Amino acid sequence: MKVTTIILFGAVVSSAVFMSTSVRAEDELVASICDYVAADDKNRLRKKLDDSRLKLRNVYDDILCGGNTLLRHAMSNNASNAGEFIVKQLPKQKLVDSGDFDWANANGHGGSAIAAAIKERAGL
């Protein structure tokens, strides 16, 4: 009885440690991506995505920077190089569905290079 309790306790503790490490790594990855976008560092953003084996089109909806999508975060920080890179990585339909272009127009970013790239790529 004691052996099974000890084994079960060990399994629970090790899974809790593994889960918290995994969550922490994901949080650090998102923070890095947000920082690179804010700094308009397209090359480091691309490298971070490649090193993490992520496709932006698959994770775009899951990444929020201060409550904003990556494109909104890029527009808010005048990060046109990173923003245009993000636009090129996303499918046209995702650009249409995201509402980022409407958000840009409503928040004074309608004249930005990123908004122009969204408009051109999505055919808005």
Image (cartoon, rainbow, N blue to C red):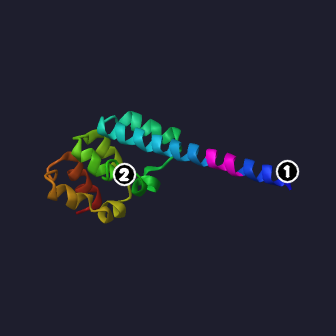
Residue under circle 1?
3
Q: Residue at x 68, y 47 (%)?
A: 13
Residue under circle 2?
64
- Whether 36 is among the magenta residues is no
The foreground one among 22 and 99 is 22
The foreground one among 113 and 10 is 10
| 84 vs 104: above or below | above
Secondary structure of residue under mark 1: helix
Q: CA distance from mark 1 to mark 2?
A: 45 Å
The foreground one among 89 and 3 is 3
Q: Which residues fall within the magenta stretch?
A: 12-18
Query: Does 46 sit left or right of 77 as displayed?
Result: right
In x, y percent, where is residue 94? 36, 61
In x, y percent, where is residue 74? 27, 45
Q: Residue at x 21, y 52 (%)?
A: 115
In x, y percent, where is residue 57? 43, 54
In x, y percent, where is residue 10? 74, 47
- Give the amino acid at mark 2: Leu
Task: Give the mark, 1 or 2, whose residue is nearer the N terminus.
Answer: 1
